[in-house]
Amino acid sequence: MRSRAGAAYRFDPGALCLELLTTGGPGAFRRYEVLHAPADLAAWAQRSRLDPTPRLEVSEAELADARVLRDALFRVATARAQDRPLALEDLGAINAFAVRSPMAPVIGPAGERSWAGPASGAELLATVARDAVDLLTGPFAHRIRVCSAEDCFLVYADTSRPGRRRWCSMEHCGNRHKVRALRARRAEEG
C-alpha cells in the first residue's frame, strides 16, 4: 500500500475478504474508491492473496456487486471490531454472495494448483464472501480490529500469536505512533 505521502508499506489484513476493503468503502470512504471498471476488480484479484492469480472475466454488473459486497463487509467487520450488533441487511448481502458457486481450484498437469476457468466476477465474489463467513464465524472473529491510529481506518484480523496487534502496519501507523510518542517525551524533558 501507499501512504498519503507516497511511502510504500506492507499491510496484511489477515484474510482475503478484508483485502477487498482496501478498494474503497461506504459513506465517507467512497472517496478512496478504486473499483471503477471491471479490469480494476481483476487487478485487485491479482494483488490479493489468491494464489495463483485467477484469470477473470468481470462484467459491469459484477463490478457493481463487488462494491455491494465490499460495503457490507466493511460495515460488518467494523461492527465486529467495535463490539456492535451486526446489521441483518449486511449479513444477508454477504450470505447471498456466499451461497453462489465459488471459483473452483484444479490440479494442473505438473501438479500445480490452478483455477478452473476463466472465472467470472460472480465466482470471485462468492469466494470472497465464503472467506468472510469463515472469518466471521471462526477463531479470529473476536480479533477483527480497526487500526489504532487516529487517521487510519484499515480493518484487519489480528492473527498474531499473542493477539495484541494494534496497527495496520508497524512500518506505517505503528512507526508514526512511536515517533510522536518519542517527540512528546523529548518535549516534556526539554
Image: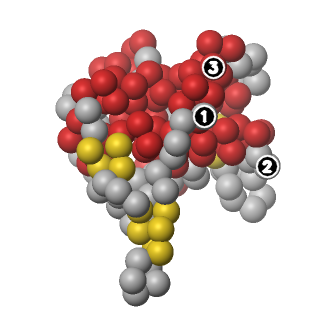
**Relative side of 64 to 170, left or right:** left
Numbered label tally: 3
User: In the depicted view, which residue is nearer to us: 37 or 7?
Assistant: 37
Q: Which residue is drawn at 68% across and 44% down?
A: 135
Residue 63 locus on image (x, y percent)? 31, 29
Amino acid type indicated by mark 2:
Pro
**Relative side of 67 to 156, left or right:** left
Foreground disc of the pair 3, 2: 3
Q: Work out whether mark 3 precedes mark 2 in sequence or the reverse, and give the earlier one.
A: 3
Residue 18 in view (yes/no): no
Foreground disc of the pair 3, 1: 1
Amino acid type indicated by mark 3:
Gly
User: In the depicted view, which residue is nearer to us: 164 or 80?
Assistant: 80
Q: Are marks 2 and 1 in contact (CB under 8 Å)?
A: no
Q: Work out whether mark 3 precedes mark 1 in sequence or the reverse, and give the earlier one.
A: 3
Using the rendered view, name the quadrant where residue 68 is placed: top left
Q: What element carries label 3?
A: helix
Q: In this view, does 86 lie above or below 103?
A: above
Can you identify the residue that label 1 sits on? 99
> What is the distance, in whole Å, between disc 3 and disc 2 at their CAs?
21 Å
Q: Is mark 2 on a helix, strand or loop?
A: loop
Q: Where residue 4 is drawn, which disc sits there? A: none
Q: Residue at x 26, y 32 (%)?
A: 59
Residue 126 locus on image (x, y percent)? 51, 39
Q: What element carries label 1?
A: loop
Residue 187 locus on image (x, y percent)? 51, 39
Q: Where residue 139 is drawn, which disc sits there? A: 2
Amino acid type indicated by mark 1:
Val
> What is the distance, in whole Å, between disc 3 and disc 1 at their CAs?
11 Å
Can you identify the residue that label 3 sits on? 92
Q: Do the residues labelled 3 and 1 touch (CB within 8 Å)?
A: no
